[in-house]
């Protein structure tokens, strides 16, 4: 460390045009730690302007900067400056600074969030950096409704995909057995012992054992039973700590929000979920539309057959949907256009689609053209917003005017813009003013990234997880559902 200091000192001590000492104090006083260098003595380094001094400790890196804090009180005060540790966090290889800042300021205290937060306490990012480096890696599983994504919280992205727990066994197989088989399969693929790390699991909002879950007593009982079974299966496998969170809530976290409406286009259905301060507002109403990813794929298959377009399998059709389809801003105007596009399918050659490209996604807004009797997506979201407005849960309506899309099919180009346009046309100005629709922040893996964000918190697993001993406390078990 001393060698690095001498090297950096030699390269910058004679730099022309150095900042004055007054500039140095101004730069450091702008940080949240309000460090005053005028009262500190750093020996020969007192000659250096603040920006060069910061370059020195940045060049040392986070590890050696930590060591410098024990040299003397003056260096400790300098090294504890928040701007330095924000710099180190901004250069994290797998997480953006925006996500880290949101997590540490909005989620660190754990659920439930403060409804009316007081002034945010000053955070020590040096302490946060140190704690985040010590957080154990977690297994992260996004259960999904079509297929699940799994991987390590310290990795940049999911490491694999699998069938969901709904597809393990059959409908007669007890849920406990299906979940044990499911989790055992994931742990085996990741080559890790269940007892080694905590786990964060996302759970589908409204699809369980083939039935749609609405806000009824039987639906509530089904959710409670699923929740207990997940914890029971994992604790019986000796997992040290478990965090199970609703998939829609995790998608909202990935968009760096704790309140809003999540539109999750699942495998079989699309759910419109109002969330306030990290809690699903089931009493306001969760709207469910009977059109999901499977229906869109099936509709594209029908369109291709009608136009004598050859394909090898349903997987081929899904691949074409994901790579060629989009949502038209104006469906009627789009019908008059001819915009063919091709995609190369391995082993089958190029396949060209034209009007099928936007007709497929249109059934989200006009389900009847796909033979489905249901309201359109825009109508379901508008209805949810209308309920949120009437409920008067907060002093203003801003909380439900951010709409976050989630799910692989929600990645269709043009969907966010079309939905936002339709909502402005459907709702009165008093409600529609300020509406913003956000595409899936991390594509099909959005919920997984929301879980990763939670599992990398500086105080994880602390306030977010349950241990086997705590799992008997019913009130805490219910918090995140």
Image (cartoon, rainbow, N blue to C red):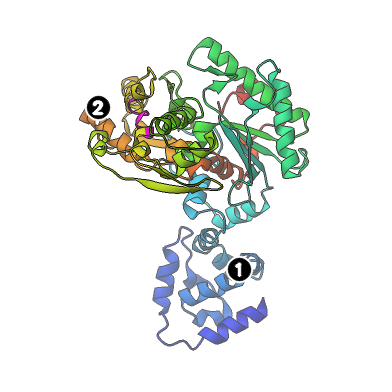
Which is in the foreground here, disc 1 or disc 2? 2
Around disc 2, counting alpha carbons within 10 Å, would you say few (fewer than 14), some (14 to 19), or many (20 or more)? some
353 in relation to 155, above or below: above
Relative vertical location of residue 337 with respect to residue 332 in this rendering, above or below: below
Residue 283, given in percent of the width and then of the height, sits at 44, 18
Regarding residue 256, the answer to whether it shows in the image is no
Furthest residue in direction front, as rendered = 308
Percent coordinates x, y for residue 414 in the rendering: 34, 41
The x and y percentages for residue 273 are 44, 27
Nearest the eye: 272 or 344 = 344
Residue 423 screen position, x and y as percent: 28, 31
Residue at 56%, 83% in the rendered image: 9
Asked whether, in this view, residue 152 is left or right of residue 450, the answer is right
The structure residue drawn at horizontal position 61% and vertical position 79%, both measured from the top left corner, is 5
220 w.r.t. 327: above or below: above
Q: Earlier in the sequence, mark 1 or mark 2?
A: 1
Judged from this view, the residue extending furthest toward the top is: 217
Q: CA distance from mark 1 to mark 2?
A: 54 Å
Q: Which residues are magenta?
A: 360-366
**What residue sits right under mark 2 in the picture?**
426
Quadrant where the image shows the C terminus: top right
432 or 9, nearer to the observer: 432
Residue tagged 1: 61
215 falls in the magenta region: no
């Amino acid at each position: 460390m001393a060698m690095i200091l001498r090297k950096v000192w030699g390269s910058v001590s004679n730099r022309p045009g150095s900042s004055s000492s007054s500039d140095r104090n101004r730069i450091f006083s702008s940080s949240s730690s309000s460090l005053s260098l005028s009262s500190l003595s750093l020996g020969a380094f007192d000659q250096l302007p603040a920006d060069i001094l910061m370059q020195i400790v940045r060049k040392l890196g986070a590890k050696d900067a930590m060591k410098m804090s024990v040299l003397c009180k003056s260096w400790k005060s300098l090294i504890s400056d928040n701007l330095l540790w924000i710099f180190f966090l901004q250069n994290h290889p797998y997480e953006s600074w925006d996500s880290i800042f949101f997590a540490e300021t909005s989620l660190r205290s754990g659920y439930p969030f403060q409804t009316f937060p007081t002034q945010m306490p000053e955070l020590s990012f040096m302490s946060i950096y140190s704690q985040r480096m010590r957080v154990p890696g977690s297994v992260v599983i996004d259960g999904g409704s079509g297929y699940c994504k799994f991987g390590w919280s310290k990795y940049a992205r999911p490491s694999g995909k699998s069938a969901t727990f709904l597809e393990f066994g059959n409908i007669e197989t007890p849920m406990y057995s299906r979940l044990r088989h499911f989790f055992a399969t994931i742990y085996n693929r990741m080559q890790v012992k269940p007892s080694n790390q905590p786990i964060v699991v996302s759970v589908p909002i409204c699809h369980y054992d083939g039935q749609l879950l609405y806000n009824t007593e039987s639906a509530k009982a089904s959710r409670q039973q699923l929740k207990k079974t997940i914890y029971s299966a994992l604790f019986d496998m000796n997992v040290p700590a478990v965090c199970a969170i609703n998939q829609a809530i995790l998608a909202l976290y990935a968009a760096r929000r704790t309140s809003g409406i999540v539109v999750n286009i699942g495998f079989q259905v699309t759910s419109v979920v109002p969330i306030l301060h990290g809690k699903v507002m089931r009493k306001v109403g969760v709207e469910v539309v009977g059109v999901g990813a499977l229906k869109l794929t099936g509709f594209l298959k029908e369109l291709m057959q009608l136009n004598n377009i050859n394909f090898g399998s349903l997987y081929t059709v899904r691949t074409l949907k994901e790579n060629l389809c989009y949502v038209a801003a104006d469906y009627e105007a789009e019908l008059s256009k001819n915009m063919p596009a091709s995609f190369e399918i391995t082993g089958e050659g190029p396949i060209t689609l034209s009007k099928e490209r936007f007709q497929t996604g249109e059934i989200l807004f006009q389900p009847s053209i796909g033979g489905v009797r249901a309201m359109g997506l825009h109508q379901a979201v508008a209805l949810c917003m209308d309920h949120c407005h009437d409920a008067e849960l907060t002093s203003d309506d801003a909380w439900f005017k951010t709409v976050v899309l989630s799910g692989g099919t929600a990645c269709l180009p043009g969907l966010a813009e079309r939905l936002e346009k339709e909502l402005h046309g459907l709702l009165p100005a008093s409600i529609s003013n300020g509406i913003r629709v956000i595409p899936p922040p991390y594509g099909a893996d959005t919920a997984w990234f929301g879980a990763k964000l939670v599992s990398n918190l500086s105080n994880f697993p602390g306030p977010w997880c349950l241990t086997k001993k705590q799992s008997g406390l019913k009130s805490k078990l219910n918090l995140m559902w």
